[in-house]
Image (cartoon, grey):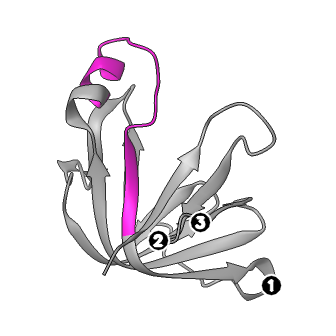
């Protein structure tokens, strides 16, 4: 079974600062973090290590990380799931560190049962 690809879009234009979702059939959607909450299940955190290391070392930012998930639910703002904001936030910023981080640990390639978006952040549930 192929995976749905989810990432945060930082490319300039009308979809700047939106979640980009690419479905297995190639369909692409963009969603504002303030309007929807993404609930991703059966996830793997992907990262091109060599590209993210170049960005970390001062290179140009390019797409190098995303979440692969088997199932995705898009929740509208009036039905948001309350995530524990003090809980386990999964972070990715190659300018800060060249890999996915959870509780200070490198979690590149790791499986997560469920991730939920809260605004621009991702949390392990």
Q: Which residue lies furthest to the top in this view?
A: 58
At horizontal 48% and vertical 75% (from top left) the residue drawn is 84
Q: Is residue 93 left or right of residue 10?
A: left
> Which quadrant of the structure image shows residue 123?
bottom left
* 79 displayed left or right of 23: right
Q: Which residue is at 19% across, 57% downward? A: 109
Say which quarter of the image contains residue 102: bottom left
| Spot occupied by residue 57 in the image (x, y as percentages of width and height) | 29, 14
Asked if 2 appears above or below 98 in the picture, the reply is below
Q: SS of the residue at dot 3?
A: strand
Residue 98 belongs to magenta span? no
Which residue sits furthest front? Answer: 25
Identify the residue position indicated by label 1 in the image: 78
Q: Residue 118 carries which label?
A: 3
Is 110 above or below relative to 93?
A: below
Q: Earlier in the sequence, mark 2 or mark 1?
A: 2
Residue 121 appears in view = yes
Read off the magenta span: 52-68
Residue appearing at x 40%, y 52% in the figure: 66
Local packing at callout 1 (Cα closer than 10 Å; few below 14, some 14-19, many 20+) is few
Foreground: 100 or 69?
Answer: 69
- For label 2, the residue is 24
Quadrant that contains the N terminus: bottom left
Q: Earlier in the sequence, mark 1 or mark 3?
A: 1
Camera-side residue of 41 and 101: 41
* Residue 65 highlighted magenta (yes or no): yes
Q: How far apart are marks 2 and 1 (CA)?
A: 28 Å
- Quadrant occupied by the C terminus: bottom left
Image coordinates of residue 106 in percent, x first then y, are: 18, 48
Callout 2 environment at 10 Å: few (<14), some (14 to 19), or many (20+)? few
Asked whether 51 or 28 is in front, the reply is: 28
């Amino acid at each position: 079974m192929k995976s749905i690809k989810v990432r945060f879009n930082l490319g300039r234009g009308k979809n700047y600062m939106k979640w980009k979702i690419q479905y297995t059939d190639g369909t692409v959607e963009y969603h504002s973090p303030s309007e929807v909450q993404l609930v991703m299940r059966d996830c793997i955190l992907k990262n091109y290590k060599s590209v993210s290391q170049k960005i970390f070392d001062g290179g140009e930012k390019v797409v190098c990380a995303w979440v692969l998930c088997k199932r995705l639910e898009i929740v509208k703002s009036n039905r948001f799931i309350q995530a524990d904001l003090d809980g386990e936030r999964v972070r990715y910023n190659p300018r800060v560190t060249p890999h996915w981080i959870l509780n200070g640990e490198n979690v590149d390639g790791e499986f997560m049962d469920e991730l939920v978006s809260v605004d621009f952040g991702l949390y392990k549930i």
